[in-house]
């Protein structure tokens, strides 16, 4: 079972003060122990980098870069994927949905992924299974 990892999971994993940190840490350890292939996009990495740098600081970003990134398979967004995601965003006409979100859904579809490690309800709305399961 391959798993897509979202910014919401990365941030909860990295911020020990986040309300979802314990759930994120537990899920991350399960994924690592199971040796599941873990995927993300370069757009998620840009978003996560900015968030960590701003909220946690450079030490947190260094830890993310040294400890988390080496186990990730990064899917690089090309022009076609970007255009498809932008189209999906514009068609949705939703202010609370981002281009990064839409890029993630398009990438997951292209990679044949059905499961996302995330704390973002939008993944479920798009038909993907979210880990950890609600209430876990």
Image (tube, rainbow, N blue to C red):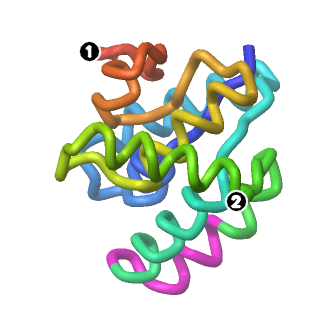
The mark found on residue 79 in the picture is 2
The secondary element bearing badge 1 is classed as: loop
Furthest residue in direction bottom, as rendered: 58
The x, y position of residue 88, in whole percent, is 42, 40
Decide whether residue 132 is among the magenta residues: no
Badge 2 density bin: few <14, some 14–19, many ≥20, Cα 10 Å: few
Number of disc labels: 2
Residue drawn 81% across and 25% down? 35
Where 35 sits versus 54, above or below? above
The answer to whether residue 68 is seen in the rendering is no
Read off the residue under disc 1: 135
Quadrant containing the N terminus is top right
Task: Please check the rendered image and state whether residue 56 is part of the magenta-colored stretch, yes or no.
Answer: yes
Residue shown at 54%/42% (left/top)? Answer: 104
Which numbered marker is on residue 9?
A: none
Left or right of 87, for residue 39 = right
Between 86 and 107, the one lying in front of the other is 86
Q: Which callout, 1 or 2, points to the residue nearer the camera? A: 2
Residue 96, x across and y down, in percent: 20, 49
At horizontal 67% and vertical 21% (from top left) the residue drawn is 113
* Magenta stretch in the rendered image: 55-64
Q: Which residue is drawn at 76% across and 19% down?
A: 34
Q: Is residue 77 left or right of residue 53?
A: right
| Side of 77 relative to 92 (left or right) | right
Task: Decide: is 94 above or below 23.
Answer: below
Q: Which corner quadrant holds the C terminus?
A: top left
Q: Which of marks 1 and 2 is nearer the N terminus?
A: 2
Which percent across, then down, holds residue 54?
Answer: 36, 82
User: Magenta-highlighted stretch: main secondary structure?
Assistant: helix
SS of the residue at dot 2? helix
């Amino acid at each position: 079972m391959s798993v897509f990892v979202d910014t919401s999971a990365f941030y909860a994993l990295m911020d020990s003060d986040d309300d979802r940190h314990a759930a994120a840490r537990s899920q991350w350890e399960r994924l690592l122990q199971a040796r599941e292939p873990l995927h993300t996009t370069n757009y998620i990495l840009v978003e996560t980098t900015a968030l960590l740098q701003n909220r946690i600081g450079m030490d947190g970003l260094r830890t993310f870069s040294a400890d988390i990134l080496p186990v990730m398979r990064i899917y690089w967004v090309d022009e076609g994927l970007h255009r498809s995601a932008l189209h999906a965003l514009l068609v949705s006409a939703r202010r609370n949905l981002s281009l990064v979100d839409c890029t993630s859904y398009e990438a997951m579809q292209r990679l044949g992924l059905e499961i996302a490690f995330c704390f973002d309800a939008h993944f479920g709305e798009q038909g993907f299974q979210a880990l950890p399961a609600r209430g876990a």
